Image: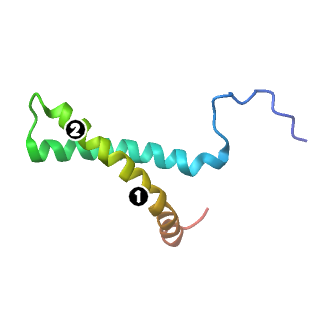
Amino acid sequence: MLEPRTTPVPAWKLHARATPFVFAFFMAGIMAMLMCLVITAANAGIDGQYPMRVLSAYCLAMPVAFCCVLVVRPLVVRLVGLTVHPH
């Protein structure tokens, strides 16, 4: 028989229903920052204005990346399901 959960869930954690949105937020944030760092360096070089140029690009890239991850995620899940054997 299963015993009841003895450790309380922290109040700051989101409900499991938020998982796709939290995943999209973190994935978009990390990928947008990495891409902004690389593309800004490749296009304009690294100098004293580099951090400001990266942050400026990130302000546009993050919301766009978030929306794209939300839209593309179901397709990616389906493609993975078609190409990977289940356990």
| Residue 44 appears left or right of 6 | left
Determine crowd level at label 2: few under 14, some 14-19, many 20+ residues with C-alpha closer than 10 A: some
User: 67 or 81: which is nearer to us?
Assistant: 67
Residue shown at 12%/31% (left/top)? 49
Say how many tags the image has: 2
Image quarter of residue 48 = top left
Relative placement, left or right, of 9 versus 46 is right
Classify residue 4 as left or right of residue 30: right
Q: Position of residue 65 (x, y in %)?
A: 37, 52
Q: Residue 14 carries which label?
A: none
Q: Mark 1 — residue?
A: 68
Dot 1 surroundings within 10 Å: few (below 14), some, or many (20 or more)?
Answer: few
Residue located at (72% from left, 30% from top): 9
Q: Describe the element under mark 2 as helix, strand or loop.
A: helix
Q: Is residue 27 above or below residue 6?
A: below
Q: Distance between the residues labelled 2 and 1?
A: 20 Å
Question: Residue 43 location in percent, x, y?
Answer: 10, 47
Q: Which colour scheme is used?
A: rainbow
Amino acid type at image mark 2: Val
Q: Indicate whether 35 appears above or below 86.
A: above
Of all residues, the one furthest to the right in this rendering is 1
Task: Give the percent coordinates (x, y) of residue 1.
Answer: 91, 41
Residue 75, position in %: x, y?
48, 67
Tag 1 secondary structure: helix
User: Which disc, if any, is residue 54?
Assistant: 2
Residue shown at 29% from the left, 42% from the top: 58
Residue at 12% over, 46% down: 42
Q: What residue type is labelled 1?
A: Cys
Q: Sequence-wise, which precedes: disc 2 or disc 1?
A: 2
